[in-house]
Image (spheres, rainbow, N blue to C red):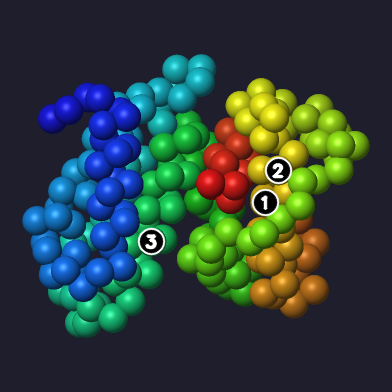
Amino acid sequence: MSGNLPTILSEINAIQGEMTTRAYWRDEEKQARYRDLVTQRQAVAGPVAGGEETGPRIAIASVSEYVSEHGTADGYSTYMNLARSAADVAINMPAADYAQFERSFEALPDDITAAALAELLTSKPSAEDVPETSARSFARTPAGAILAHEWGQNFRHNMGLVRARLYRIMDRFDESNDARFLGWLESLSTPAAVAIYRKLAA
């Protein structure tokens, strides 16, 4: 098993490029290879900052396992995309933070969780950079400080993407849920917020 993260990521990206083809969904060996690579990526990435254990490895079912549970392969592509997104989020936060994030997300109204999951299956929007004053204000928060350092000159642009995607999520549910959703965002731990914003900007 290779421990070279750039090589692992390169192969993951190559396979992801094939996921829209019928050949991929008929090739269980390649699907198994993809699941193995995701596991390798999580193992090689190691502990997050502070030396804490990262979030759980996300088990990704094969087509045959999915069909065994659901009775059909319909929806498997959607399932794979969501499982991949969950793995991306889990790997970037400590296990305790991920557990709390998962509990709080599942406690949200169904309309909110459905809207958030739908956004993960949607391509990135065109977005303007956030204003300089907004960027400076967010950079003073714990999560913002981490992302400002990480993203550098792309900070304002990436935050523009995050904001646009959050707006699209909110457009998918009734205004009566706005306060609940925004309150949930505010309640996220710093590692959870950073992981979510990274995913939305990716």
Query: Which amino acid lies under the numbered mark 2 shown in the image of this protein?
Result: His
Q: Is residue 120 left or right of residue 174?
A: left
Residue 81, disc: 3
Q: Is residue 123 above or below residue 59?
A: below
Q: Residue at x 40, y 23 (%)?
A: 47
Residue 35 seen in this snapshot: yes
For label 2, the residue is 157
For label 1, the residue is 161
Position in image of residue 161 (x %, y %): 67, 51
Q: Is residue 140 above or below residue 188?
A: above
Q: Residue at x 84, y 31 (%)?
A: 136
Q: Residue at x 70, y 35 (%)?
A: 155
Query: Which amino acid lies under the numbered mark 1 shown in the image of this protein?
Result: Leu
Q: Given this view, does label 2 or label 3 mark the residue nearer the observer?
A: 2
Q: Is residue 20 above or below residue 12?
A: below
Q: Residue at x 75, y 69 (%)?
A: 177
Check disc 2 and report its element: helix, strand or loop.
helix
In the rendered image, the residue lying farthest to the top is 50
